[in-house]
Amino acid sequence: MFTGIITDIGKVERIEKRGDTHLVIATHYDIGAIDIGASIACSGVCLTVADKGATAEPWFAVTASAETLSKTTVGGWKVGDPVNLERPLRLGDELGGHIVVGHVDGVAEAVSVLAEGESRR
């Protein structure tokens, strides 16, 4: 579970396509506080940490399946792209946003955008 509140802006450092797609994302998070198998919302997509480390800067690695690539924006990411990051909600944390899960239930297409004051509908 997530709140939708971004807590870091990461950067795609490496993309490897070998069956599934493996991505390395640079972060400012304390890597010591991230467990292998932890979930991190990456630009709204819940991905599982498969590896982590620190070379020039801290990083974590995730794997995206073909289904993830077909139903999210992850397939369009390029090396150097910024990624909104959010750690999962812990029991007792202030919500501050709203409860979201980061799992895709369907795909929609925006058919129109209407100006409404200073916003868009």
Image (tube, rainbow, N blue to C red):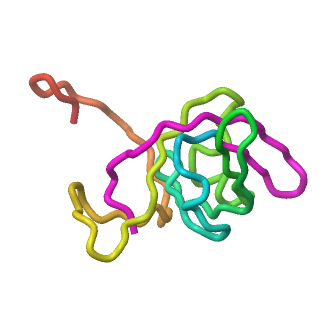
Which quadrant does the C terminus fall into? top left
Q: How many marks?
A: 0
Which quadrant does the N terminus fall into? bottom left
- Residue 65 placement, left or right of 87: right
Considering only vertical position in the picture, is 69 above or below 58? below
Q: Residue at x 71, y 30 (%)?
A: 79
Q: Position of residue 74 (x, y in %)?
A: 62, 45
Question: Which image quarter: residue 114?
Answer: top left
Q: Position of residue 4 (x, y in %)?
A: 34, 53
Question: Which image quarter: residue 59?
Answer: top right
- Residue 9 placement, left or right of 121: right
Point out the residue furthest to the right here: 18
Question: Which image quarter: residue 120?
Answer: top left
Magenta residues (range) = 1-25
Point out the residue furthest to the left here: 117
Q: Nearer the viewer, residue 66 or 57?
A: 57
- Residue 108 placement, left or right of 3: right
Considering only vertical position in the picture, is 39 above or below 113? below
Q: Residue at x 78, y 40 (%)?
A: 15
Q: Residue at x 24, y 60 (%)?
A: 98
- Residue 120 placement, left or right of 106: left
Please, what is the dominant secondary structure of the magenta stretch? strand
Tell me if residue 111 is in the magenta stretch: no
Tell me if residue 4 is in the magenta stretch: yes
Q: Position of residue 89 (x, y in %)?
A: 37, 66
Q: Position of residue 7 (x, y in %)?
A: 39, 45
